Image (cartoon, rainbow, N blue to C red):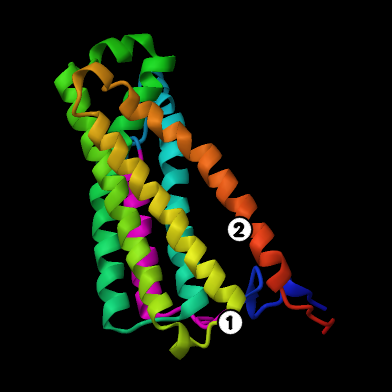
């Protein structure tokens, strides 16, 4: 027996229109898998203890990057399951998203390797020290890359919302779609702000700190979302 969000034809109360794994989704999974492969610190087996330690030092940054890509993958997975769209627009936007993810991998890996090494491996931090102009360029690339990835996701959800009548979205599903658009738009704005702050020498340090604002923003967004959707959840009888 299933209730509400646990029903096999629902995802958190949202009816699933894409239940089967399509060629588009299989292609997307393959690209995300390749992107994760690019994050691996080294493809060679460590040959001595020093190599092993160097490899393990890259594990924290790899874990953080893995989480970032998993979040993006999950957003696309939910989109595919909820709407089941495979028209030309959905295919083009998905390909744009995958292209940006592959572009985003190396700046993401470099940024977190640099940040983690600076905190935990002082000798490596000294070797990898960046000049202020280099740091500014790095944060600009990261901010614009983040904004571009989530812009592609926003366009996918906007496409689904434009087809809300054809898809037969009910009030709860329309609310969820709007909130996904708003949630991803917040990430776009923060990414652009980070890139903008990186252009000013006096406040370039804030280009990294601005991303911490996402935690309270997204938390508040989730709370408001849950309150608004609670009255719209259908009372689902036992099966």
Q: Which residues are magenta?
A: 15-40
> Which secondary structure is most common in the magenta stretch?
helix
Q: Is residue 59 visible?
A: no
- In the figure, 172 relative to 121: above or below? below
Q: Quadrant of residue 200?
A: top left
Q: Nearer the viewer, residue 208 or 49?
A: 208
Q: Position of residue 151 (x, y in %)?
A: 31, 58
Residue 150's disc number: none
- In the figure, 166 relative to 52: above or below? below
Does residue 198 appear left or right of residue 54 in this picture? left
Q: Quadrant of residue 132?
A: top left
Does residue 221 appear left or right of residue 96 in this picture? right
| Tally of marks | 2
Q: Nearer the viewer, residue 193 or 78?
A: 193
> Residue under circle 2?
225
Q: Position of residue 81 (x, y in %)?
A: 51, 75
Q: Position of residue 156 (x, y in %)?
A: 36, 69
Which callout, 1 or 2, points at the residue further toward the start of the chain? 1
Quadrant in which the N terminus appears: bottom right
Q: Is residue 134 visible?
A: yes
Q: Quadrant of residue 40?
A: top left
Q: Position of residue 206 (x, y in %)?
A: 34, 24
Does residue 182 appear left or right of residue 12 in this picture? left
> Residue under circle 1?
170
Query: Tag 1: Cα neighbours inside 10 Å, few (<14), some, or many (≥20)?
Result: some
Q: Nearer the viewer, residue 12 or 206?
A: 206
Label 2: state its secondary structure.
helix
| Cα–Cα gap, marks 1 and 2 | 16 Å
- For the point 27% across and 39% down, which residue is it? 142
């Amino acid at each position: 027996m299933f209730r509400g969000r646990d029903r096999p034809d629902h995802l958190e109360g949202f009816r699933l229109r894409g239940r089967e794994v399509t060629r588009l989704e299989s292609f997307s999974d393959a690209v995300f898998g390749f992107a994760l492969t690019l994050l691996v610190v080294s493809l060679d087996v460590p040959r001595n203890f020093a190599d092993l330690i160097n490899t393990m030092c890259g594990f924290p940054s790899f874990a953080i990057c893995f989480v970032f890509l998993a979040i993006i993958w999950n957003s696309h997975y939910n989109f595919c399951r909820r709407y089941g769209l495979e028209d030309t627009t959905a295919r083009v936007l998905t390909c744009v998203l995958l292209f940006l993810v592959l572009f985003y991998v190396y700046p993401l890996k470099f940024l977190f390797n640099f940040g983690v090494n600076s905190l935990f491996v002082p000798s490596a931090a000294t070797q990898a020290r960046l000049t202020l102009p280099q740091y500014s360029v790095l944060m600009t690339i990261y901010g614009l890359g983040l904004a571009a990835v989530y812009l592609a996701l926003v366009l996918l959800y906007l496409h689904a919302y434009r087809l809300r009548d054809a898809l037969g979205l009910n009030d709860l599903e329309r609310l969820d779609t709007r909130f996904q658009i708003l949630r991803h738009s917040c990430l776009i704005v923060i990414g652009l702000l980070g890139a903008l702050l990186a252009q000013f020498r006096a406040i370039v340090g804030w280009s990294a700190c601005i991303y911490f604002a996402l935690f309270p923003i997204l938390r508040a967004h989730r709370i408001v979302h849950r309150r608004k959707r609670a009255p719209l959840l259908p009372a689902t009888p036992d099966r």
